[in-house]
Image (tube, rainbow, N blue to C red):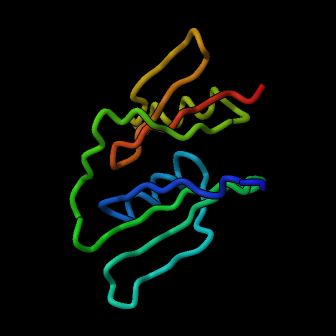
Amino acid sequence: MKFKPVHHNHNVADMAKSIAFYERALGLHEVRRKQAEDDSFTIVFLGAEGSDMQIELTALREHPDTYALGENEQHIGFFVDDYAAAYKLHSEMGCICYENPDMGIYFITDPDGYWLEVIPEK
């Protein structure tokens, strides 16, 4: 029996704002979308070229507010080929929330407060 991770879900309050963030900050693009017939939810899968892993963004009509993330001790890591350019972009966007220079990494937050780790490709 073999398992292969295919996506990680984030529930979001504003789908358009979240998609715009992931496109600009991480270069992800919409792969597919599912809209409930009664408009109770929208699901958008975002992906990157060269990777099978996707981020599933879910917006629930009945939950348009920010989600309580508790201690938010989870994150998704992203390799980047140009760490300096990524750092500059994320600094300009004002989304860097934590840096660990000793490890050579930093974290950014999306519009809903989810943490995303940026790791230089070595």
Q: Position of residue 1 (x, y in %)?
A: 78, 56
Residue 2 in the figure: left or right of residue 87: right
Quarter residue 7 falls in = bottom right
Residue at figure coordinates x 50%, y 79% from the top left:
34
Residue 36 in the image: state x and y as whole percent: 40, 84
The residue located at (36%, 76%) in the rendering is 41
Check the image and report above or below for 21 versus 97: below
Residue at the spot x=45%, y=37% of the render?
A: 74
**Residue situated in front as seen by the camera: 114 or 81:** 114
Compared to residue 56, the image places residue 119 above or below, namely above
- Choose between 18 and 62: the one closer to the eye: 62
Of all residues, the one furthest to the front in this rendering is 1
Query: Which residue, as the protein is rendered here, is positioned at the far top?
Result: 102
Left or right: 40 in relation to 78? left
Residue 44 coordinates in the image, percent (x, y) = 50, 69
In the shown orientation, is residue 19 left or right of residue 6? left
Q: Give the quarter of the image for residue 83.
A: top right
Question: In percent of the image, x 31 and y 33: which residue is there?
Answer: 71
Q: Check the picture and name the quadrant holding the C terminus.
A: top right
Horizontal and vertical percent position of residue 58: 41, 65
